[in-house]
Amino acid sequence: MCLRHAIFSWLMLLSLLVPDISHTSTDYSSAPDFSLLDQDGKPVALSALKGEVVLINFWASWCAPCRQEMPLLDTLYKRYKKLGFTLLGVNVEEDSDKARDLIKVNSVSFPILFDRKNEVSKLYNLVAMPSTVMIDREGKVRFTHAGYVAGDESKYDKWIRELVRE
């Protein structure tokens, strides 16, 4: 295991020990823009999604909570996509083969993007795997959440409902 994976694993464990690593933004800073390739090799830019509520979920195939969370995120995506909501799953591994294998087994309907150089994960200052960022229709970061424990998806559901109503 490389040092980066060891650090992410340690941070993921730490996030499980802390009851809630959610943050509600009060300054509503602009979400850093990025463009990454999706699973079909097509570029997807965050700026192209302005006007929609966007949930970005950073994940890795070696992260058990990430794998547990994926089908629950897909349920949210299917429930709210007609209301101007989109979900981007951003894989943070240099080698995307394991991520692609996982996607084949646990197919999801939301776009999966690949951050092979960890440039986007650095822009968002990740502290744990998985990490979730909620962006409003104006492109402002409104909520962040690090880690995943069962039940966190209800928090995401609440945030999505709040933002699609604005």
Image (cartoon, grey):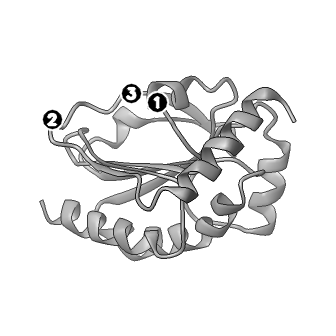
**C-alpha span from label 2 to label 3:** 17 Å
Closer to the N terminus: mark 2 or mark 3? Answer: 2
Q: Nearer the viewer, mark 2 or mark 3?
A: 2
| Along the line of sight, the residue nearer the viewer: 132 or 138 | 132
Residue 86's disc is: none
| Residue drawn 53% across the image and 74% down it | 150
**C-alpha span from label 1 to label 3:** 14 Å
Amino acid identity at mark 1: Asn
Query: Whole-percent x and y of residue 148?
Result: 54, 61
Query: Whole-percent x and y of residue 29?
Result: 22, 31
Tags 1 and 3 touching, CB below 8 Å: no
| Residue drawn 64% across the image and 58% down it | 66
Residue 77 vs residue 11: left or right? left
Residue 151 vs residue 93: left or right? left
Q: Which residue is mark 2?
A: 27
**Where on the picture, by quarter, is residue 107?**
bottom right
Relative height, residue 80 to residue 40 (above, below) = below
| Along the line of sight, the residue nearer the viewer: 17 or 138 | 17
Name, please, the residue furthest toward the front: 17
Q: Quadrant of the N terminus?
A: top right
Sort mark 1 into few (<14), some (14-19) or many (20+) by Cα contacts within 10 Å: few
Residue 55 vs residue 99: left or right? left
| Residue drawn 46% across the image and 56% down it | 87
| Residue drawn 35% across the image and 69% down it | 155
Closer to the N terminus: mark 2 or mark 1? Answer: 2
**Where on the picture, by quarter, is residue 25?**
top left
Q: Which residue is mark 3?
A: 33
Q: Is residue 156 visible?
A: yes
Q: Which residue is mark 1?
A: 125
Give the secondary structure at mark 2: loop
Amino acid identity at mark 3: Asp
Residue 55 vs residue 101: left or right? left
